[in-house]
Amino acid sequence: MSRKRVLVTGGAGFIGSHLCERLLEEKNDVVCMDNLFTGQKDNIRRLMDNPYFEFIRHDILEDVYVECDQIYNLACPASPIYYQYDPIKTGKTSVIGALHTLGLAKRCHARILQASTSEVYGNPKVHPQPETYFGCVNPNGVRSCYDEGKRMAETLFFDYHRQHGVDIKVIRIFNTYGPRMRSDDGRVVSNFIVQALRGDDITIYGDGMQTRSFCYVDDLIEGMVRMMNSREGFTGPVNLGNPLEITMLELAETVIRLTGSKSKIAMFPLPQDDPVQRKPMIDLARNELEWEPMVSLEEGLKRTIDYFKTI
Ligand code: NAD
Ligand code: UDP
């Protein structure tokens, strides 16, 4: 069997680097494209010696010319701190990045997967969220550059599919965590673990009663690869996430317990438009991809804590 040529944009990031590793294990020829805004060379350092791995430092806002059979489009900062750092660029990255990768898919007749997000549901009024829910999104708040950028990217994916017959796959990723998140990433799991290991206060925003559902990165990667290789004509969108829902207060207590930390909990104001609740319905992924998360929150947190102890 000849190797598939797979392009991963955002491949030096947290999820992207795990994906590149998995694709190489499966004997693909992997091109990792990243501008290293939030991604890091350290994430892919151990892949650099592999002759079937190439790293291209490239901004997705510039045209992309690579011959490939499959494209995973992950390029976009995902942490609120980073995507709000230059919100105009974040919007451009989602929209122009989608246009560039879709154009490439059209030219190469490649199959293309978009890393969309649970943020397309905004602050959801339907709970848990099925793929059929259109969401409740503020179009002009501080999170909109990311949420609306990702929504527009989904629109472009489906229009390229309808208008040009491009072979698309769209996944909506719910909060994912694991090794290789940056310690200064700002997302809740990495923040709490780093704070607990340092003995600093655990920073809860708001009253800590808002919920999220956390998926361990290995489970997500399995779902992504299954979706990419799913049956012809199944485009998604499909939710990929762990349906176990917990409050941020419960998460803080769990991290304190698992690290044996003496950290105290400290309350801070809730950021604007912070979703109150979030939990995926994953029936579609179960039925179409025969996928569901296997790693429990405690096990995933332990592995992530072990990682942060080493850096
Ligand atoms: P990340 O920030 O670690 O990865 C994003 C990568 O994209 C980084 O390596 C970054 O340098 C790169 N990038 C950003 N802008 C770019 C540009 N203009 N050109 C080229 N590369 C660029 O975040 P992640 O958690 O690994 O997220 C990966 C993808 O998954 C993102 O598209 C994100 O929106 C999506 N996603 C992640 C989660 C999650 O919980 N981790 C949830 C929903 C969706
Ligand atoms: N959060 C928190 N303390 C932190 C970081 C985040 O309480 O130090 C909260 C945040 O307000 C949100 C939840 O944790 O309600 C998840 O935040 P994250 O940025 O990880 O992801 P997102 O809000 O994009 O789901």
Image (tube, helix red, strand yellow):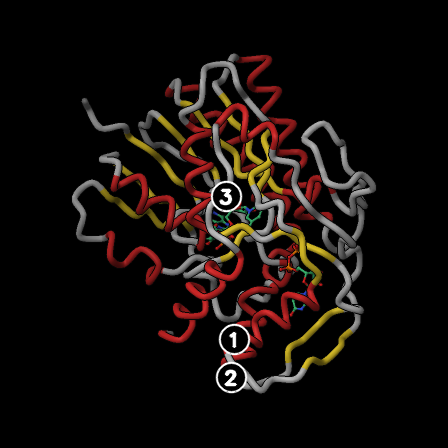
Q: Is residue 106 above or below residue 303?
A: above
The numbered dot on residue 194 is 1
Quadrant location, the C terminus: bottom left
Residue 228 vertical position relative to residue 82 in the rendered view, above or below: above
Which quadrant of the figure has residue 14? bottom left
Q: Give the residue at mark 3.
A: 293
Q: CA distance from mark 1 to mark 3?
A: 25 Å
10 to the left or right of 252: left
Q: Residue at x 44, y 23 (%)?
A: 230
The residue labelled by disc 2 is: 198
Q: Amino acid at mark 1?
A: Val
Q: Residues within 10 Å of mark 3 (few under 14, many from 20)?
A: many
Q: Are marks 1 and 2 in contact (CB under 8 Å)?
A: yes
Who comes first in sequence, dot 3 or dot 2? 2
Dot 2 lies on which element? helix
- Quadrant of image for the N terminus: top left
Q: Secondary structure at mark 1?
A: helix
Mark 1 packing: few (<14 Cα in 10 Å), some, or many (20+)?
Answer: many
In the picture, measured across the screen, residue 291 lies left or right of residue 158, that is: left
Of the residues tagged 3 and 2, which is closer to the observer?
Answer: 3
Say if disc 2 is inside 8 Å of ligand 2.
Answer: no
Q: Residue at x 47, y 61 (%)?
A: 181
SS at circle 3:
loop
Residue 100 in the image, given as x and y percentages of width and height: 49, 32
| 235 sits left or right of 150 in the view | left
The amino acid on which the numbered mark 3 sits, given as a three-letter code, is: Pro
Res. 17 mark:
none
Q: Position of residue 307 (x, y in %)?
A: 39, 68
